[in-house]
Amino acid sequence: MSIEKREGPTLVQLKVNGETRSGIAEPRLLLSDFLRHTLGLTGTHVGCEQGVCGACTVLLDGEPARSCLTFAVQVAGSCVETVEGLAVDGRLAPIQEAFRSEHGLQCGFCTPGFLISADAFLDEHPEPSVDEIREHMSGNVCRCTGYQGIVAAVQKAAELRREAADGD
Amino acid sequence: MKPASFVYVAPDGLDEAVDALREYGADGKALAGGQSLVPMMNMRLARPSALVDITRIAELSGIRRNGRTAIGATTRQKDVLADPGLAVEFPVIRAALHNVGHAANRARGTFGGSVAHADPAAELPALMLALDAEMVIRGPDGERVVAADDFFITYYTTDLDVDELLAEVRLPPRAPSVWGFTEVARRRGDFALAGAVVTATTDAAGVVQSARVVLFGVTDRPVRAEGAEEALVGRRLDDGGIVREVAELAAEGVDYTSDVHVPGIYRREASVALVRRAIRQAASLLGG
């Protein structure tokens, strides 16, 4: 049995969007701030810092998680996926394409969290109903759109993903 | 909105965790999923000088079935929700968990973390009372077991001492035959403004042999409405004549909280309606 102890600044290494990244973090540094300030990945947004708004949502070992409620030291060695990892070779992912075509955003502040939450949801529910979309996306807050465009975008993304899968 | 400095300790053994909690005493705090503790730290409502991360302790995680079903304290809420055995045996757990935060919170948040945090408006502490669950606690002197009835003391306060951990919750040997779970919240996933859980064991004819009626989000901790429980015994849940009377009885004798969200009288009125709905929901599950 062993104990890991961290006090003051220490080295934290993790995988972000498939790349090994490292930086110095005090135990109190939130994963959201580690991504933004230490690693310069400012796509992950910070809204309420109390786990309510969902803007800071990232995938942590494949599961959606609030990066503002997670300390960087807790997730050393884990795999993190952020909004920067969605597009491949400059081509928007289906979920991003759908948010654009269906007007799923206005100011865009909440969008990174919505994209990550929606993409993880579609992995598990490839053919979601509107109710399921609304239920799942209830963990993300948008103050611009009134959500209609967002729900339409998630439906559209599900279609785009199915088409892409059929094309393979 | 940044937490104060602390020392981070992550043991992979339960004894080491208890030693660490004893070392830091009242300044230390156990960290599991962090979905309640970290917001409080961000707002500096909590500023522990040490966090003991208990999520690496293998024996605290997972669902076990040795005669009785037990849920390890650091089992993620998402994994409890997805467990097919529990869904069949204790469907009321699923109903409660669907109301706990959102998918991203349940992916990190732990079952025992929510129970030990003891937010008076949280669903899982109320569920523990409604199921007559047992809290298995580990501390410097080994293990002790406390009934849910004696575990929740007041706001964010349980029977746990500063150097003790909730290790697992033990579910009763026999699941209730019917149940109802209802709450009102401003938005999906929010803490309840008021909520009610009803569980009952009925005989073959549908007559209640024992029942639990629990209110949450209405006072400093989840509370049992014992008068209402007694009134249900010997009756059928679908006996329309008793539902109103039992619901009124359930809402009596509670010191309702008035706060920025709603006045106490709202919580009282809501409690009556919610108990009525929970009984009807339970009655709808009666066979035949």
Image (tube, rainbow, N blue to C red):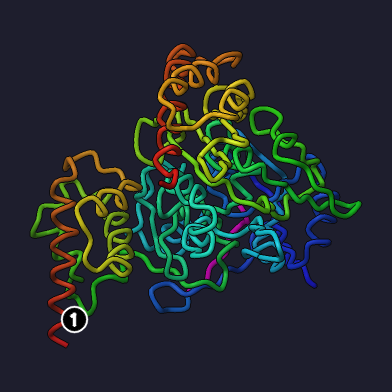
Residue at position x 31%, y 64% from top? A83
Residue B185: image quadrant is top left
Does A24 appear in magenta? yes
Residue under numbered circle 1: A165
Residue A153: image quadrant is bottom left
Between B125 and B273, the residue placed more toward the observer is B273
Q: Say above or below: B58 vs B225.
A: below
Question: Residue B85, how many percent across, how many down?
Answer: 53, 64
- Which quarter of the rendering shows the C terminus of chain A? bottom left
Question: Residue B238, how many percent across, how many down?
Answer: 43, 32
Does A98 appear in magenta? no
- Which quarter of the rendering shows the N terminus of chain A? bottom right
Q: Say above or below: B231 vs A25.
A: above
Q: For the magenta stretch, what is the residue range?
A: A21-29
Extreme residue in the right direction: B141
Between A121 and B234, the residue placed more toward the observer is B234
Instruction: Please state if A43 lies on the left or on the right of B267 as rendered.
Output: left
Residue at position x 65%, y 33% from top? B156
Chain bearing tag 1 is A
Circle 1: element type? helix
Residue B71 seen in render: yes
Q: Say above or below: B168 vs B256.
A: below
